[in-house]
Amino acid sequence: MIDDIQAAIPLGFLLSFMIGPVFFVLLETSATKGFRAGVSLDIGVIFADIVFLLIAYFSSFQLLENLSNEPGLFVFGGMILLVYGIFLFVKKAKKKSNVKASKGTYLGLLVKGFLLNFINIGVLAFWLGLIIVVGPSLENNPDRMMVFFSTVLLVYFITDLIKILLAKQLRRYLTQERIVLIKKGLGIILIICGAVLITKGFLPKDRFDIQEKIEELEDL
């Protein structure tokens, strides 16, 4: 369990810096309306992630069951991450001035955060690909997967709290050029992960063990 938690921590931190509309609305809301408003919005975002995660898990349950017997199915998860990474890499960043924090109660901000995240089908595709990637390394054990993804979301939320506290400073230093670099960096990471999974699908199990590769990355 400790190893699963350690593996989930960097992933949760990485997810918190996925550049998109939610990222900017969170900063804008926190800077103009304060800490509580930012937290309310972020809770809605996290709740949408939980819903997507549950949908992705139960929709891929049978796929996960067959994955150990049909390694070629790794190609499916790899393609999802690869396409999502390419999308992040090539998509142009929108200007921050296009994003405005709307007025509303804390409950309204929570609903807004949920809807902002929920309407992005790419988030569902990302969670689906991630589940297919990590499922076999967690032996498709529901308890281990619960610990892993709970840790991811917890670290994600804690990192967002730090972003909320530093919202004004982040808005000042987050230039258009830096946004592009962050997006391209995240895209490259996902492209590499997708390529690894696709390679896994075409190689014999004893030639390429994903768990071994994950452990090697953790030792770096």
Image: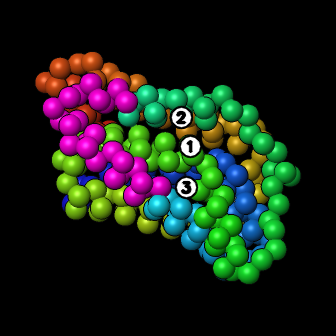
Between circles 3 and 1, the one closer to the viewer is: 1
Mark 1 sits on what residue?
122
Q: Residue at x 63, y 53 (%)?
A: 119
Mark 2 sits on what residue?
84
Above or below — where is 34 with respect to 181? Answer: below
Q: Is residue 55 magenta?
A: yes
| Labels 2 and 1 touching (C-beta < 8 A) | yes
Sequence order check, earlier mark of 2 and 1: 2
Distance Cα–Cα, label 3 vs label 1: 15 Å
Q: Is residue 107 visible?
A: yes
Mark 3 sits on what residue?
16
Q: What is the magenta range?
A: 52-76
Image color mode = rainbow
Above or below — where is 192 with respect to 23? Answer: above
Q: Main secondary structure of the magenta part?
A: helix
What type is the residue that disc 1 sits on? Answer: Gly
Could you say which is closer to the camera, residue 180 or residue 139?
Answer: 139
Sequence order check, earlier mark of 3 and 2: 3
Q: Residue at x 76, y 57 (%)?
A: 171
Query: What secondary structure is found at the residue carrying circle 2?
Result: helix
| Relative image position of residue 188 (x, y in whole percent) | 53, 31
Query: What secondary structure is found at the residue carrying circle 1?
Result: helix
Near mark 3 (Cα within 10 A), the count class, few <14, some 14-19 or many ≥20, is some
Distance Cα–Cα, label 2 vs label 1: 7 Å
- Left or right of 168? Residue 149 is left
What type is the residue that disc 2 sits on? Answer: Tyr
What type is the residue that disc 3 sits on? Answer: Ser
| Relative image position of residue 204 (x, y in whole percent) | 17, 20
| Relative image position of residue 81 (x, y in whole percent) | 46, 34
Between circles 2 and 1, the one closer to the viewer is: 1
Q: Residue at x 73, y 60 (%)?
A: 25
Could you say which is closer to the camera, residue 107 or residue 2?
Answer: 107
